[in-house]
Amino acid sequence: MPARHPSGGPRVSTDPERAAAALIAGSLVALPTETVYGLAAVASDRTAVARVFEVKRRPADHPLIVHVDSLASARQWVLAFPEPAAALARRYWPGPLTLVLPRAPWVPDEVTGGQPTVALRVPDHPLTARVLELVGEGLAGPCGVVAPSANAFGRVSPTSAADVMASLGGRLGPADLILDGGDCRVGLESTIVDASGGELRVLRPGAVLVDSATGQPGDGEVAVLPRVPGSHSAHYAPAAEVVIASGEELLAASASPIPEDLGTGLLAPVGIETPVGWIRLASPTDDVEFAAVLYRGLRAADDAGLHRIVVVPPTTGGLLPAILDRLRRAAR
Ligand code: TXA
Ligand code: MG
């Protein structure tokens, strides 16, 4: 565990005015969104953005998502907003969709990792919507805050204020803030669609299902392998080993229990029984609930000191591509 900040950790608040004031003053604020909590800094504040990288221990060339309050604000960050992307934005914003577009020339390299594109999203959470509005009123120029997931680089994203405190509390100072907006509704990071070329390409599957070829709602399949940090091995990973199993494989394991199997957690759909000696982490009823409890379950296993987490994914539902994507990365 990193040493605590010498003058104490971040404050926790439910007040968007306080969060906006902290951001405007150059501090970092963990913001709730419908997907996961983000570690926010004003995008035009180079010192604050540099601190986001430092606190997360994130490599400098990994670009950040700029969070804005509206499609109109998003347009200020880009050279062009091609119509297929604008159609997606109109349909899904505010919501769990990030669009990668050609960046406006003034957008800082720190935000884009030096890439010619910028990633933009309008999050769907009332507290954070208010923060973005207030930051826009308080600062001159295009408003926006960068917000990577508020976890140490490569680890599991936080879906509650307590998760943020556990992940980064020791690295944040007393002027920083965690805005407590409750548990995240979706629980998995946004769908990322690259709209900077001629056609749309899904870079990271999420709750918004986009067909890469048509830009229309689709099955959420990822058409290309992303060149983004989320594609690194051991990303979204807890300390415990993650093993993906089918319901049948689990039945076989139950039939011949291994005595030294203590310290194994199970995250599986309701109706699947827990082998003797294993610790049940969650029993979601469908893909939506599975997504919402997945990261919480992985964290709970680490908190309990389990050495292995067996996960039986759901077999149907629109969130399946995103769930399998995150599980495959966690299991590496
Ligand atoms: O749901 C989310 O998207 C959350 C919440 C907080 O909004 N944010 C999030 O941020 O997941 P982060 O930094 O953990 O993941 C952002 C992903 C990274 O994989 C990054 O490489 C990719 O977005 N990204 C950002 N800018 C990009 C760009 N210009 N081109 C391609 N990928 C980009
Ligand atoms: Mg992340």
Image: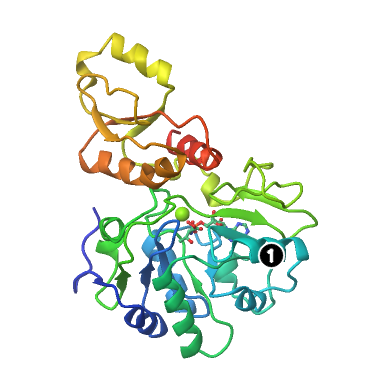
Question: Residue 66, how many percent across, how many down?
Answer: 54, 69
Q: Secondary structure at mark 1?
A: strand
Can I make out residue 116 in this image? no
Image quadrant of residue 142? Answer: bottom right
Residue at the spot 60% in from the left edge and 71% down from the top edge: 109
Q: Between residues 205 and 292, which one lies in front from this camera angle?
A: 292
Quadrant of the snapshot with the C terminus: top left
Question: Residue 294, how many percent across, how many down?
Answer: 38, 42
Which quarter of the rendered image does ligand 1 occupy?
bottom right
Image quadrant of residue 258? Answer: top left
Q: Residue furthest top?
A: 256
In this view, 63 is above or below 22: above
In this view, 208 is above or below 239: below
Residue at the spot 48% in from the left edge and 81% down from the top edge: 133
Can I make out residue 68 in this image? yes
Residue at the spot 37% in from the left edge and 73% down from the top edge: 28
Which residue in the protein does label 1 denote? 101
Q: Between residues 109 and 142, which one lies in front from this camera angle?
A: 142
Q: Between residues 43 and 171, which one lies in front from this camera angle?
A: 43
Query: What amino acid is labelled 1 in the image?
Result: Leu
In this view, 138 is above or below 125: below
